Image (spheres, helix red, strand yellow):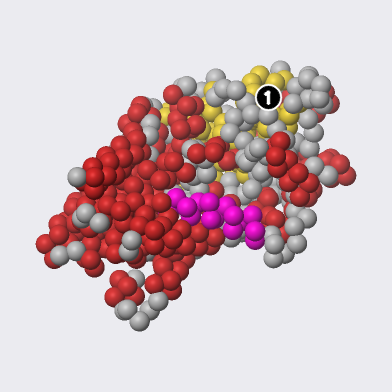
């Protein structure tokens, strides 16, 4: 990529387009994770060598293209489950990509502004500016933390172990630091460039040394046997009344098969039942009898309805035994334009555009199930990509994290794989095993090291049983949360304030 930058005959737009595309392909399913260590350098070179307004535009272009390629799987969902005609189905994906790209543009503009005083200072601040931008994007307007740079490294276990210190933000910071050092080799003096390379080398070397050390360290003090169901039921059939009996039959058969392995807990996916469980007494009796027959509690996803008029609906995980429902958790963080419509009073009309848009009520607290097999927490679908929410469950005593999801909306695209790639970080952040039950995949067992121990391919119908370790201690991230992101915001703010004072003087 550096060779491309050095060839002035190549248009800047072409270089940035190639780099942005390469950055997106570093994520699943292409998993060209090595590209992420170099492809941001062209944007940083552009930022330090162009005026702030131009840098904003180039950064927005780069970021929009990156997210458009990364989120291309969304077009499948809109083509399949909405009334929007193709190619207009790309419009929502483009709008979301342009929104996310604004954060990249803002970082590029900030780097450019700092570079007017010192290029070395600007490149040194760029990792903190980037991480600060990721944190803001993950929180503003409900947050959309998809595509954080660190997630591209989910298969590189020595790299991601630092997530137990600073979360996924730590890995993103190291990636940008290496890219900044490469950019410095192209725009700084030899002395400054060598200094940047040396500093980035120390950061990367320290990251790898820490990772290798932690991978050799025992992490748990107990185990449990957990089974997950992957029924592989196509989305159009999930709530089809004529298919309901077959759906339940599939789950019963898989559960009976898993029962032969004597698990301590059997996990069904999100919204597994084609009924409102608490209002279906026959289904409750069936599940109670099934739990008694396999001698294991069942963790089942279902839509729930309260007694209000009209009823408020929740996306709920129920824990059942032969005695009936013994615990429940209502999903807290709902999917915008999937489970609710933001600003519904203004744009509520979009509900009629697509069948995947529901109107659910969020839960109110991060409930931790007491067990068996041990205190555990459930994050439903999208919730698991929010580090601070998973931390709430861990602080509440969870020794195991269960993720139940339904990614059938995304078919055989890269979407389910990108979703899976975030959970190794939740595991490392707290040194906790993650058990994942997905309707059509990708179901998986993830060790506290972030290693995906076992996984089920998309659309394979099976029951999978595994011994999983239970969380034994507390990590730095468990105790202090997003301290690194707050530090990045502070460093970014201080750098911009110092630049403003220097300009005023």
Residue reaching furthest to the front = 505
Q: Secondary structure at mark 1?
A: strand
Question: Can residue 324 be seen in the rendering of this structure?
Answer: yes
Q: Quadrant of the N terminus?
A: bottom left
Q: Nearer the viewer, residue 27 or 374?
A: 27
User: Pointer 1: what residue?
Assistant: 320
Q: Nearer the viewer, residue 355 or 102?
A: 102
State the residue at coordinates (86%, 41%).
241
Residue 206 image position (x, y, % from top left):
22, 47
Residue reaching furthest to the right = 242
Q: Quadrant of residue 262?
A: top right
State the residue at coordinates (70%, 42%).
347
Q: Quadrant of the C terminus?
A: top left
Residue 502 image position (x, y, % from top left):
21, 46
State the residue at coordinates (64%, 21%).
327
Q: Which residues are magenta?
A: 90-104
Q: Nearer the viewer, residue 87 or 395?
A: 87
Q: Main secondary structure of the magenta part?
A: helix
């Amino acid at each position: 990529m550096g060779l491309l930058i050095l060839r002035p005959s190549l248009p800047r737009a072409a270089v940035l387009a190639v780099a942005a595309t390469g950055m997106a392909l570093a994520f699943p399913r292409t998993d060209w994770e090595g590209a992420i260590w170099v492809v941001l350098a062209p944007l940083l070179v552009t930022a330090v060598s162009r005026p702030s307004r131009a840098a904003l535009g180039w950064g927005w272009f780069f970021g929009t293209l990156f997210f458009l390629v990364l989120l291309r799987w969304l077009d499948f969902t809109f083509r399949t489950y909405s009334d929007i005609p193709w190619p207009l189905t790309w419009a929502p994906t483009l709008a979301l990509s342009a929104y996310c790209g604004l954060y990249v543009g803002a970082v590029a503009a900030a780097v450019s502004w700092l570079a007017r005083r010192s290029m070395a200072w600007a490149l040194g601040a760029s990792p903190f500016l980037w991480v600060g931008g990721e944190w803001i994007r993950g929180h503003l307007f409900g947050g959309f933390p998809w595509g954080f740079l660190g997630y591209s490294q989910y298969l590189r276990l020595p790299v991601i172990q630092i997530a137990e210190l600073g979360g996924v933000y730590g890995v993103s910071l190291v990636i940008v630091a290496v890219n900044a050092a490469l950019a410095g080799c192209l725009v700084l003096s030899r002395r400054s460039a060598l200094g940047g390379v040396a500093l980035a080398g120390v950061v990367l070397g320290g990251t790898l040394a820490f990772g290798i050390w932690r991978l050799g360290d025992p992490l748990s003090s107990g185990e449990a046997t957990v089974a997950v169901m992957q029924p592989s039921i196509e989305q159009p059939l999930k709530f089809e009344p004529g298919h309901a009996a077959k759906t339940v039959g599939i789950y019963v058969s898989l559960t009976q098969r898993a029962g032969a392995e004597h698990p301590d807990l059997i996990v069904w996916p999100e919204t597994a039942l084609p009924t409102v469980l608490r209002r279906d007494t026959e289904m409750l009796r069936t599940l109670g009898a099934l739990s008694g027959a396999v001698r294991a509690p069942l963790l089942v996803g279902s839509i729930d309805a309260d007694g209000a008029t009209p009823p408020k609906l929740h996306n709920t995980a129920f824990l059942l035994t032969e005695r009936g429902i013994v615990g429940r958790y209502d999903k807290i963080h709902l999917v915008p334009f999937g489970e609710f419509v933001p600003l519904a009073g203004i744009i509520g009309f979009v509900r009629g555009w697509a069948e995947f848009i529901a109107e659910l009520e969020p839960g109110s607290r991060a409930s931790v199930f007491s067990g068996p097999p041990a205190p555990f927490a459930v994050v439903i679908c999208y919730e698991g990509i929010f580090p601070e929410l998973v931390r709430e469950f861990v602080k509440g005593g969870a020794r195991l994290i269960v993720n139940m999801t339904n990614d059938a909306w995304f078919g055989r695209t890269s979407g389910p794989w990108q979703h899976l790639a975030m959970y190794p970080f939740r595991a490392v952040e707290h040194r906790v095993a993650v058990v994942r039950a997905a309707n059509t995949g990708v179901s998986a067992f993830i060790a506290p090291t972030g290693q995906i121990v076992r996984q089920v391919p998309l659309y394979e119908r099976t029951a999978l049983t595994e011994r999983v370790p239970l969380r034994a201690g507390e990590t730095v991230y468990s105790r202090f949360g997003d301290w690194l992101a707050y530090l990045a915001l502070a460093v970014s703010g201080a750098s911009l304030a110092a630049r403003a004072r220097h300009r005023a003087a």
